[in-house]
Image: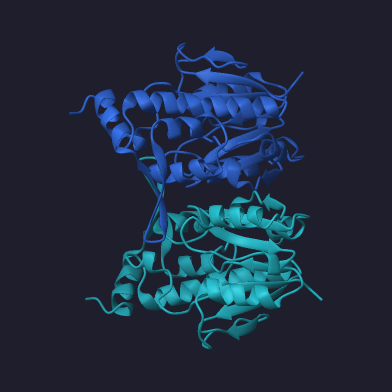
Chain colours: A blue, B cyan
């Protein structure tokens, strides 16, 4: 049986820190495109993706969907209690994930392999014995997860990959996606009119005026 | 002969984007501490560090120092023209570099191995034939370097490491150093009173009031 990769996903008002540059409808499409990229990467790494969604509106080719009303940590900790075989947790907002980078995670021989996210978070976990681990996402969850593993006497490997380390929350993260992305979320960014912009030696993103106008309609502003 | 790793370094008014939270004297110390971490990592990876400095004030145990009045690109391109054997370029502001992550770069069999920095830059390069390459730093240099390699018909490998990908320019980058750093720049941050701060689920840095006051003196403010 292939390793199951659980991908938590909350479809409502996603990626709110991108509100300044994307309307809500666009953020919904963008979050689903990133989810699609992660599902694709998980499949290409030979794992079975399971989307843990907070409502039944989500579907994604090749992935099973489980609906849970619970918050992220409760949903995962329920799962860990039931699950005796190894599993993967992968966040839905790491669209640079690919089969090679996920392969480093899956290939770890540690009892817990962890991928730190940018800014103290956790982007992915490989748990050989989920029952011995506890999820504590939000805030500096990487440090919390390292402590939980140490307290449980579990061996840990930190996976060194910028592709898995890059989560997309803020405008500056779109730069990484435009430079290193190859999947549907990057294509959507281009469709929405985003491109790289270099000003005074710093790289940012800009959006075509035409698309800005469309966004005004989408988000209900004048 | 060990592979030489050239580390460009400009000692004057370094890391100006940290001015809001560090006085100039502190930024000078901090930049040198990061340089020390990179030199240490380069040595631990079995390479010979050569600091390419814009003035003679720089010294660092274990590293040769070459002084050049030229700007970064001109200095490197002069070097590439003279150099027939392989060389490494490593930026002085990637303090999470260690022997394992540098080993991935050094172990590449491509003619050009490149480490993208955060935000479109280039943090490190392995050049098997420097004479066939050209440095074009600043702005989206990662994309420029990819094109220069392609135009020269050189094979390229992009190294996937968050430790090498993380350059420290801005306040948010200090979070990465406080979480993942192990060397002298991280120790200096702690000595200067910096620590992690979690507010509304987001991780940032804070500084002890006492140290803020010292900084006021250091930077000449009231």
**To which quarter of the image does residue B183 belong?**
bottom right
Q: Depth check: give the residue in front, A40 or B69.
A: B69
Quarter of the image where the C terminus of chain A is located: top left
Q: Residue at x 75, y 37 (%)?
A: A107
Residue A217 point in image, percent of width and height: 25, 24
Q: Residue at x 34, y 68 (%)?
A: B19
Residue A142 point in image, percent of width and height: 54, 43
Extreme residue toward the left, this view: A222
> Can you say whether A52 is above or below B113 in the image?
above
Residue A95 point in image, percent of width and height: 54, 34
In this image, B44 relative to B1: left or right?
left
Q: Residue at x 24, y 76 (%)?
A: B221
Q: Residue at x 40, y 24 (%)?
A: A28
Taking the image as drawn, is residue B96 in sight? no
> Can you say whether A111 is above or below A43 in the image?
below
Quarter of the image where the N terminus of chain A is located: top right
**To which quarter of the image does residue B129 belong?**
bottom right
In this image, A141 relative to A198: left or right?
right
Taking the image as drawn, is residue B117 in sight? yes
Extreme residue toward the bottom, this view: B56
**To which quarter of the image does residue A88 belong?**
top right
Residue A150 point in image, percent of width and height: 64, 44
Extreme residue toward the top, this view: A56
Count the labels in the image. 0
Q: Depth check: give the residue in front, B137 or A132.
A: B137
């Amino acid at each position: 049986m292939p390793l199951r990769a659980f991908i938590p996903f909350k479809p409502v008002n996603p990626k709110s820190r991108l509100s300044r540059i994307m309307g809500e409808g666009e953020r919904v499409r963008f979050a689903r495109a990133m989810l699609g990229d992660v599902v694709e990467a998980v499949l290409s790494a030979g794992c079975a993706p399971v989307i843990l969604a907070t409502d039944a509106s989500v579907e994604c080719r090749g992935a099973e969907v489980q609906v849970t009303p619970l918050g992220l940590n409760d949903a995962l900790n329920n799962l860990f209690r039931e699950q005796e075989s190894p599993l993967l947790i992968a966040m839905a907002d790491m669209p640079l994930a690919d089969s090679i980078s996920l392969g480093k995670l899956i290939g770890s021989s540690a009892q817990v392999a962890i991928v730190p996210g940018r800014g103290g978070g956790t982007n992915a976990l490989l748990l050989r014995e989920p029952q011995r681990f506890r999820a504590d996402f939000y805030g500096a969850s990487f440090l919390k997860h390292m402590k939980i593993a140490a307290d449980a006497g579990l061996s840990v490997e930190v996976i060194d990959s910028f592709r898995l380390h890059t989560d997309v929350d803020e405008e500056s993260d779109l730069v990484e996606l435009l430079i290193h992305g190859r999947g549907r979320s990057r294509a959507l960014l281009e469709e929405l009119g985003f491109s790289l912009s270099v000003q005074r030696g710093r790289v940012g993103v800009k959006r075509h005026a035409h698309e800005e106008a469309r966004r005004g309609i989408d988000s209900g502003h004048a």
